[in-house]
Amino acid sequence: MKYKRVEHVAMAVNNLDEVREIFENKLGLKLDYIESFPQYGTRMAMYPVGETCLEVLEGVSTSDPAKWIAQHGQSLYHICLEVEDIDAAMSELRAKGADFQTEKPMVGHGNCRIVFIDPKSTGGLVIELVEMPKQAHGHQRAAE
């Protein structure tokens, strides 16, 4: 399996709008897009930095980012590695003893296919795999 790039580094935050103020007005980063995922209880903003993005996740109530913040505070949350074929990557990692949080990939940011490796398989680290759609929007399109 070949990893194409670090697609994004995610941060879990209490208030997306406050972080947007910092990222955009103090750091001068340009917002690519914002998405809401009510099914996951999350709202996210994506900021391209070179070939990688910074993903800012605001979780509500019992979402995974909200649970993370309750345990760790606002902080780095996970790293996302882009693969060409997520199904093949999952098969290869399963053969090496890795487990996943879901049996099959889910639809994630920018309509890509994502899956999280079970942190029990990675020493507690949260690692996401992503397969970008052929017609991605925003920064991902420019990176292909």
Image (cartoon, rainbow, N blue to C red):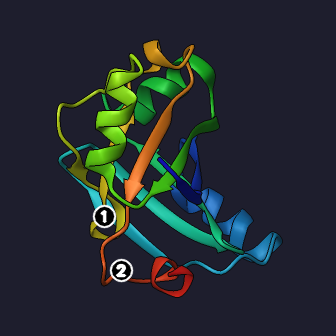
- Name the quadrant containing residue 125: top right
Vertical position of residue 91 compared to residue 48: above or below: above
In the image, 140: left or right of 123?
A: left
Task: Find the distance from the CA under tag 2 to the CA under tag 1.
Answer: 8 Å
Q: Which mark is residue 112?
A: 1
Residue at the farthest right position: 26
Give the residue type at disc 1.
Cys
- Looking at the image, do the residues carrying marks 2 and 1 touch, with CB atoms under 8 Å apart? yes
Total tally of numbered discs in the picture: 2
Coordinates of residue 16 in the picture (x, y in percent): 53, 56
Coordinates of residue 140 in the picture (x, y in percent): 48, 77
Vertical position of residue 38 compared to residue 77: above or below: below
Helix, strand or loop under label 2: loop
Name the residue at 45% across, 42% down: 128
Name the residue at 71% across, 67% down: 23
Q: Residues within 10 Å of mark 2 (few under 14, many from 20)?
A: some
In the image, 63: left or right of 22?
A: left
Q: Which residue is mark 2?
A: 136
Helix, strand or loop under label 1: loop
Q: Nearer the viewer, residue 19 or 82?
A: 82
Coordinates of residue 109 in the picture (x, y in percent): 35, 62
Name the residue at 55% across, 41% down: 12
In the image, 22: left or right of 120?
A: right
- Name the quadrant containing residue 117: top left
Q: Residues within 10 Å of mark 1 (few under 14, many from 20)?
A: some
Coordinates of residue 122 in the picture (x, y in percent): 53, 20
- Name the quadrant containing residue 123: top right
Q: Nearer the viewer, residue 76 or 116?
A: 116
Give the residue type at disc 2.
Ala
Q: Earlier in the sequence, mark 2 or mark 1?
A: 1
